[in-house]
Image: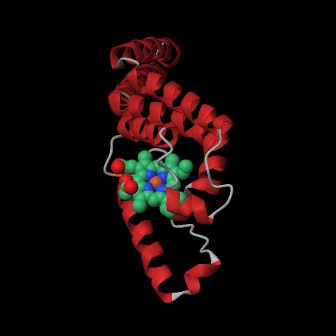
């Protein structure tokens, strides 16, 4: 009686061990699968957004959000009937091209890389904010210091986006194999 009890005990333990080993492998395989390229792209965009929030967003809030976001503070002259519809038209047009409302990556028709390039171009060329807006909003011109902040962010962002995926994958693979050693002693 006690012998068969022990036998069952051993067999039971053996199965338990087998099950948990299979589970550990399965969990690991899933982990590896779900965190490949999509994950990489997300990590890249998140890093660019973190830099954006810290350094660039305060500039855009002051000088771009009136047209390129849902946060418009209308000027006094917007009370004039025609002025309001002209402004709203501008906002609609601006947001269609580029909407800063939900941070980076921005909504609009461009890819993240195109957006970065166009933003830098628009401020270095002095196209944005548009002249008619600058005339009415004193101090809305982007300063040289602000352009430098935007330039640094765009260049760093482009570098992040251009880092070959294969390089990131390799790092992922190394991390994955490290994880294997830790969670799977079988
Ligand atoms: C008075 C409203 C207004 C303000 C303020 C403004 N923009 Fe614009 N922006 C527009 C309009 C309208 C368009 C679309 C038509 C055009 O390209 O002129 C546009 C287009 C753009 C484009 C081109 C996007 C594309 O895909 O073609 C970029 C880039 C841009 N704006 C960046 C900025 C930045 C950066 C700021 C702040 C420094 C800014 N804008 C401030 C109205 C504005």
Residue 56's place in the image compared with 31, above or below, is below
- Name the residue nearer the viewer: 118 or 69: 118
- Name the residue nearer the viewer: 62 or 165: 62
Residue 4's place in the image compared with 145, above or below, is above
- Measured as percent of width and height from the top left, residue 161 is found at 41, 27
Picture quarter with the C terminus: top left
Q: Is residue 183 visible?
A: yes
Ligand 1 appears in which quadrant?
Answer: bottom left
- Measured as percent of width and height from the top left, residue 54 is found at 66, 40
Q: Is residue 106 visible?
A: no
Residue drawn at the location 43% of the way across and 76% of the way down: 86
- Measured as percent of width and height from the top left, residue 87 is found at 47, 73
Residue 117's place in the image compared with 165, above or below, is below
- Name the residue nearer the viewer: 67 or 167: 67
- Name the residue nearer the viewer: 129 or 31: 129
State the colouring used for the structure image: secondary structure
Residue drawn at the location 58% of the way across and 58% of the way down: 134
**In the rendered picture of this protein, how many numbered marks are placed on residues?**
0
Q: Is residue 54 left or right of residue 109?
A: right
Residue drawn at the location 66% of the way across and 49% of the way down: 58
- Measured as percent of width and height from the top left, residue 82 is found at 45, 84
Residue 35's place in the image compared with 6, above or below, is below
Picture quarter with the N terminus: top left
């Amino acid at each position: 009686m006690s012998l068969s009890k022990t036998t069952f005990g051993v067999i039971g333990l053996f199965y338990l061990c087998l099950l948990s080993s299979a589970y550990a492998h399965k969990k690991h395989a899933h982990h590896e699968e779900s965190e490949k390229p999509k994950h990489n792209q997300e990590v890249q965009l998140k890093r660019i957004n973190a830099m954006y929030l810290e350094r660039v967003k305060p500039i855009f809030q002051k000088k771009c959000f009136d047209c390129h976001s849902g946060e418009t503070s209308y000027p006094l002259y917007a009370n004039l009937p025609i002025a309001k519809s002209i402004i709203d038209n501008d906002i609609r047009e601006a947001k269609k091209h580029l909407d800063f409302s939900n941070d980076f990556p921005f909504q609009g028709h461009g890819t993240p890389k195109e957006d970065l390039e166009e933003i830098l171009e628009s401020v270095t060329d002095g196209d944005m904010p548009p002249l008619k807006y600058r005339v009415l909003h004193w101090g809305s011109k982007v300063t040289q210091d602000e352009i430098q902040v935007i330039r640094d962010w765009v260049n760093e962002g482009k570098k992040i986006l251009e880092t070959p995926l294969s390089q990131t994958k390799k790092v992922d693979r190394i991390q994955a194999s490290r994880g294997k050693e830790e969670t799977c002693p079988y």
